[in-house]
Image (spheres, rainbow, N blue to C red):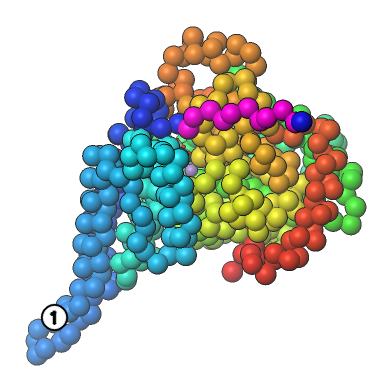
Amino acid sequence: MAAAAPALPVSLSGRFKGSFAYFTIKDRLPQILTRVIDTLHRHKNEFFEEHGIDVQIGTFVLRLFQKGVEAEKRAISFLSKLRNELQTDKPVTPLEDELPDAALWNQYLDYQRNLSNGNGEPSWFQSPWLFVECYMYRRIHAALAQNPPIDNFDVFKEGKAQNFFESQEAVIGLCTYFQELLKNIKDLDEKQLQEELFKLLQVSLWGNKCDLSFSAGEDSSQKSSPLQSLENMVPYILVNDMEKLWSLLVNAKKNRTESNVRVDIILDNAGFELVSDLVLADFLLSSKLADEIYFHGKSIPWYVSDTTKHDFNWTLKQLQSANHMWMSRCGINWEGNLKKGVWVFCDHMFWTLPHDFSSMGGVAPDLYAELQMSNLLLFKGDLNYRKLTGDRKWEYTVPFHQALNKFHPAPLCSLRTLKSDTQVGLKPGQGEQIQASEPDWMSSQESHDHVLLDISVTKEQMNHYQTAAETAQSELAALSVKYDCGQYT
Ligand SMILES: O=P(O)(O)OC[C@@]1(O)O[C@H](CO)[C@@H](O)[C@@H]1O
Ligand SMILES: [Mn+2]
């Protein structure tokens, strides 16, 4: 009789006063909502100009059907009501919009209601933090989506664009470094390739500090060139499995039979972080460590700075039109990769549901099967880490593999800047040691220099994944009609 799986620890929640979840729900989420409302106010004239209709009567021009302004007013009242619900810990209410994921959200709300087994309705401070925070962003989306003609307005686009423009020095530094590297990449030996991979993994890891939802919209752009500071950031890396990552990629390349080596990057933030992920992806291709890269973005505006398809394409266009040789070279090459199909952008709706990833197999089997086709999944950022580990109060020393709670579509790695109070995979005493030196290391923005580099896969499981990938091949054929990983448009 197999031993029963150990019980899962409780979910992080605002019901734990003093927790990072509590401060986020009490202070930061209302701040983010207020910024969204201000953004809509500031765009009133744009909505008026763009969506008003002029009617000439004699010498008078009447602006009729102020559709844009009316829609803006309705959206603002939706959001003000949402902010009040949040701040007064009202029950979480079912979604009433007709958007394609509404049924899945309301099923999940029922699930949460049953979980609380009669201890009252799911609410902002009593329910799991992951659920209510995701729910807030989904309600923000509904406030716009239900109010044409501003239904396609991205309330976070200014912040994402500002992060990109204010990170220009870092973007130029990174693109210049990378293009210089490309000039002699064919002459690099394995050791040198490994060193370059490790550098670019760390740049992508540190790029994750540039996150607007964590800073509640305050500037978080990358000012200096990250390559210069890698050395003195190494002591802040809590878990560093880069060697395992390297051997996983080298083995995949050696074992490459007829199928390509595929790496999937589950993206996080737009701006500098996205550029660092694109450079890493180009390196994996140019070094021949991988043959194809799948990028997974968000299908709706999410967590202030997360990357949508629009952000992805906008970033490539900005690079191409930059008046800097190496930036535009990168942008041109990357658009070429998309057109050749060696890079693919996808945005499955599962990534913007409240479910943690242990539910993916049941809720989005098409996406799970898609990920099983990969040799390596790189999950960027803190929210993905929280969803990988179920956003629970784990002991620090619980193995990452265990915290994944059977989510194993393929070998995976998390590249995460610690921004929430959940942490696994540490050595005995490591968490306590940091706690002693930095008591609020998991609960305040200043001390969040800790990063986590983690691979769930131990070597002996590699073979298992090879066979799993083969079986998934046949399953995927059945599923591909349901979910076609979006081709570049
Ligand atoms: O996934 P990311 O961009 O690294 O971080 C997401 C985040 O900013 O949002 C939540 C705080 O509101 C936390 O999960 C984390 O701090
Ligand atoms: Mn993010």
Give the secondary structure at mark 1: strand
Check if residue 6 falls in the magenta segment: yes
Image quadrant where one finds the C terminus: bottom right
Residue for badge 1: 62
Asked whether residue 198 appears in the rendered view, the answer is no
Of residue 273 and residue 415, the one placed in the foreground of this image is 415
Q: Quadrant of residue 473?
A: bottom right
Q: Is 395 on the left-hand or right-hand side of 182?
A: left
Q: Where is residue 233 in the image (x, y as percent from the top left)?
A: 58, 23
Q: Is residue 18 visible?
A: yes
Q: From what the image shows, is residue 107 above or below residue 114?
A: below
Residue 444 at what x, y percent from top left?
40, 25
Relative horizontal placement of residue 54, taking residue 444 as reference (left or right): left
What span is in magenta? Answer: 2-11
Quarter where residue 319 is shown:
bottom right
Number of marks present in the image shown: 1
Answer with left or right where residue 280 lies relative to residue 27.
right
Mark 1 is on which residue type?
Answer: Leu
